[in-house]
Amino acid sequence: MSDYIVNMQGIEKSFGSNQVLHGVDFLLKQGSIHALLGENGTGKTTLMNILTGILSKDGGNITVDDKENNCIAFIHQELTLVNDLNVYENLFLGCELKKQGHLDKRSMYEKATEILMKMEIELDPNTKVEDINASYKQVVEIARALMKNAKVIIMDEPTSSLTNVEIDHVFTLMRGLKKQGVSFVFISHKLNEVLEICDEYTVMRDGCVVATGEVDQTVTEASLAKHMVGKDLSYDDLYIEREIGPDIMRVENLEREREFEDINFHIGSGEIVGFTGLLGDGRSEIFNTVYGCNKDYKGKIFIGGKECIMHSTGKAQKQKISYLPRNRKENGIIKDLSVGSNMSISILERFKSLLFVDKKKEKTFVDEYVGKLNIKVADTKDLITSLSGGNQQKAILAKAISSNPKLVILDNPTQGVDIGAKLEIYEIIMKLAQQGVSFVVLSSEAQEILMLCDRLYVLFHGKVKKELTRKEANEENIMILATGGNLKEA
Amino acid sequence: MKGKIGGKNWKKLVSNNSALISFIVLFILSIMLKGTMFLSVSNIVNILRNNSIIGIIALGMTLIIITGGIDLSVGSQLAILGVVVITVFNSTQNLLLAAISGAVAAIIFGVITGILVAKCKIPAFIVTLGTMNIYRAVSQYLLNGGGLRAAGTSSEAYTFISNSNLFGIIPMPIVYWIICVIIIALIASNTAVGRHIYAVGSNEKASKLSGVDTTKVKCFAYTISALLVCVATIVETSRLGSINSSSSGTSYEMDAIAAAVIGGTSMAGGKGKILSTVLGTLTLGIINNMMNLMGVNSFLVGAVKGGIIIIAVLLQMVLNKE
């Protein structure tokens, strides 16, 4: 038995004429956590899909050192749970326990409880999956992999929707399992997590491995980022001091039952305002309402000094508000439409000549934004689902900013986006803000908020906990407020 | 990518045109079985004319299915619109007025269905199951379960609509069908609302968040469908000179759905092509015609048709698999 549980040598793969993997080597030690890093579209997911046998390889060798089959479990970035079933029914989906031909619900329930307890997660296995939030869905996915006695668990951005407390739980769990000989492949864009949890790393760029080794003292976030992008990166000089204009939006006493209450805020023109907090703080719900998705709200929304009753998303668009929703797969992309159609769906009226959409004008627009946002796409007529996650995100960002909005609401704007693309997105936001476009940035990543925002509101349990200026805010402050604590008066 | 058809591109070409391929296969099969008889001008014209009414209705059905809905009421709509159109015609002897009153009724039907489906969120299957029964019952009540003839001094003008030929050879129903196909195909592929129809069917939530008025889009689809049914009604009643409240339009909804599905329209919404639905209609038409030519017992025609629908869709799913 060798040290390596997985040994991939010279893996090659092409999609049509597009070669995505150029002879990639990947070695995974038994009982280690191995970070697989790289920008979006560099072939990380493809490589892992080849390992699990979802895709066939064009060339190269794979040896998996294990007698049992199905020892590799892949937890995808986009979750694969059935919303209408219970947690334990999801856990046992396809391998239900039976007793005399009937489902043995009691044993399944007990076993599910046992696994969740081992993970130190408080969750009743009887809860319906549609009623639990995204973070718990991820937990259920991990539990499912564990239940199948997986020896290798591949996790594709497992922590992108988890809160810090839950991330700690997952990491503790991973360390425990590591000792029992389980190996992990950890795909993530959060480099601080990589340094915290991983033993080894492999960085890919454009279908090749550019760096690999052990995570030791010499490895830093900066050095990893440099490998990924191929050049030095700096977040520091991103923020640009700007003149903030008069208020474009003011919200007074906004309230919606069971979601949020007593919400007051204002947004100046050209201002970037952050809203942050932990999961369940109600920030997405607030801006869903502001954008006109819900009719039954109390309180007042003023746009440009006039009160507006926000009863439809079409009205919000007319008021020059646009929205980039969270959860790209469910709320963002329209899967049967092409990349171009996804980008232009909000502004088709603009290309109208007589009754019809002028496809030449539309194409010019799409090409312009593909260039502006540096979207990697072979043909804008291809389906949006053929793009990698980061490029999909850029395409729907294009949709949000292309309607000449005065206010753009960005909910989790860099979900599943690599560092290079993240920086590009921030630069675009900053550039537009300089031109007087206002932004609302909803995010639980303090770094992101601190980097971009002129002012921020920290939310806790559906209420504004505190408003902070750029000068007052730091990661520590935000964390204290977001967990319900109070700042000591200086 | 032109001129580079090999491997994957070839496969893509096949799966994108599976409706055309199954149509061609059936066409060649028909020629092999009943060569000259099948290919005769009169037979081909016959197939086209006999299927023009279903063909027109199937266009609207395709739009509705693309939005993720379905309309079971189109057959009953045809009956009740027939009653409206002929009643107005008989009392006024004015063709235009009769057509307009039919169109107004159709728009009302479409908007009601659209609002019930989009605003009240009742599944389209249930809403149209209800309206199907209502329309049929009301038309039977109005005509006491019997029929109504187009009568009066201008009745010849009424029957002329469908019983005349363009250039002396092409029956007018075919011409109406072609006009409808062109209009609907343009709406589907070249207008904003057409794009919105696909978007709503593919991901309603994301469409709404992009500022698309999903209620309006769905109402539009059901209204266009009802208007197409109105055209089909006039074509049908003109051809026969009458409407029958009990038998007119029965099971047309099933043929229209079958035509759309054979044409590759996805029942889950978001996918479908107008021209493929035309091929789907013709596929069904040829099957009917061949049964007839081969003297298959008319009671068995339905069984064969049903089997071929399943095979056609199965074939497409196999071809579409990556």
Image: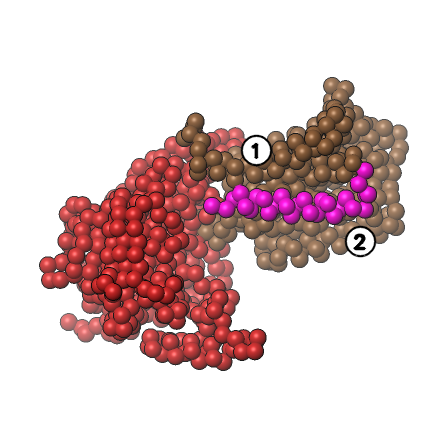
Chain colours: A red, B brown
> Percent x, y for residue B203?
49, 51
Residue placed farthest to the left in the image? A218
Q: Is residue A86 above or below residue A328?
A: below
Residue placed farthest to the top in the image? B167
Q: Is residue A235 above or below residue A134?
A: above
Between A176 and A164, the one lying in front of the other is: A176
B312 inside magenta stretch = yes
> Percent x, y for residue A72?
35, 62
Between B158 and A169, the one lying in front of the other is: A169
Residue at left 39%, top 57%? A78
Location of residue A282 (image quadrant): bottom left
Task: Classify the position of the C terminus of chain A by image quarter.
Answer: bottom left
Q: Which residue is tagged 2?
A: B137
Q: Main secondary structure of the magenta part?
A: helix
Element assignment for label 2: helix
Identify the magenta region: B295-322
Residue at left 71%, top 56%? B130
> Percent x, y for residue A87?
45, 71
- Can you see residue B265? no
Please report, as a chain letter, where disc 2 is located: B
The amino acid type found where label 1 is placed reads: Leu
Q: Which residue is tagged 1?
A: B186
Between B55 and A4, the one lying in front of the other is: A4
B124 inside magenta stretch = no
Element assignment for label 1: helix
**Mark 1 / mark 2, whichever is N-terminal:** 2
Task: Classify the position of the N terminus of chain A by image quarter.
Answer: bottom left
The amino acid type found where label 2 is placed reads: Ala
Between A387 and A276, the one lying in front of the other is: A387
Looking at the image, residue B97 sits to the left or right of residue A57; the answer is: right
